[in-house]
Image (cartoon, grey):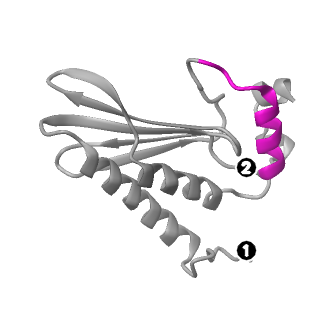
Amino acid sequence: MTDTTSAQGLPGPLQQAQLMAAIGEAVGSSLPAGWTGARFVATMTAGVSDFAVWVTRDGAETKALAPRPASKAAKQLRELMYEPGKGTWYTMSMTLQPQGSADTAFDYDSEPDFSPAPIDDAAFASDLQRFPRDADHTPDWLRAKL
């Protein structure tokens, strides 16, 4: 049986829920009046990260800086969600609605988009060292970069 207790003493799934709530609260409290939708996007490797909030207001979507507490919680969440052999996610997206609902998705397999400038392949090799994956969980795009 695998021990899923975190460094904070909480079982892993409870700490994951706590971190996701912290992200939602940090993003939600940073949004301007009149927002009708928001999406927090975290794109990460072990050494490179990009965080943004896309805010919909008056029918238009604009990009805003992500609040630091949300970025910090996302980094912790990525570490916590690592599964030996499977790896961890590269992109997380949390969509918030004004009525208080939030949907979160994690992408473990697609190549992360670090637009406008792609990152060096060495960043992916470093990430694979930090978060090892079995061959079955290593996408073709990642194999090609190694």
Bin the neighbour count of mark 2 within 10 Å (Cα to Cα): few under 14, some 14-19, many 20 and up: many
User: Which mark is on residue 2?
Assistant: 1
Bin the neighbour count of mark 1 within 10 Å (Cα to Cα): few under 14, some 14-19, many 20 and up: few
Q: Which mark sits nearer the N-terminus, 1 or 2? A: 1
In the displayed structure, does residue 114 sit left or right of residue 37? right
In the displayed structure, does residue 73 sit left or right of residue 40? right
Q: Residue furthest bottom?
A: 9
Give coordinates of residue 55: x percent, y percent. 28, 32
| Residue nearest the observer in this picture, 33 or 90 | 33
Q: Residue at x 63, y 76 (%)?
A: 7
Q: How many marks?
A: 2
Q: Quadrant of the C terminus?
A: top right
Q: Given the image, on which type of amino acid does mark 2 rest?
A: Gly
Q: Residue furthest top?
A: 116
Quadrant in which residue 56 is drawn: top left
Secondary element under disc 1, as helix, strand or loop, is: loop
Q: Given the image, on which type of amino acid does mark 1 rest?
A: Thr
What residue did someone put label 2 on? 87
Magenta span includes 22: no
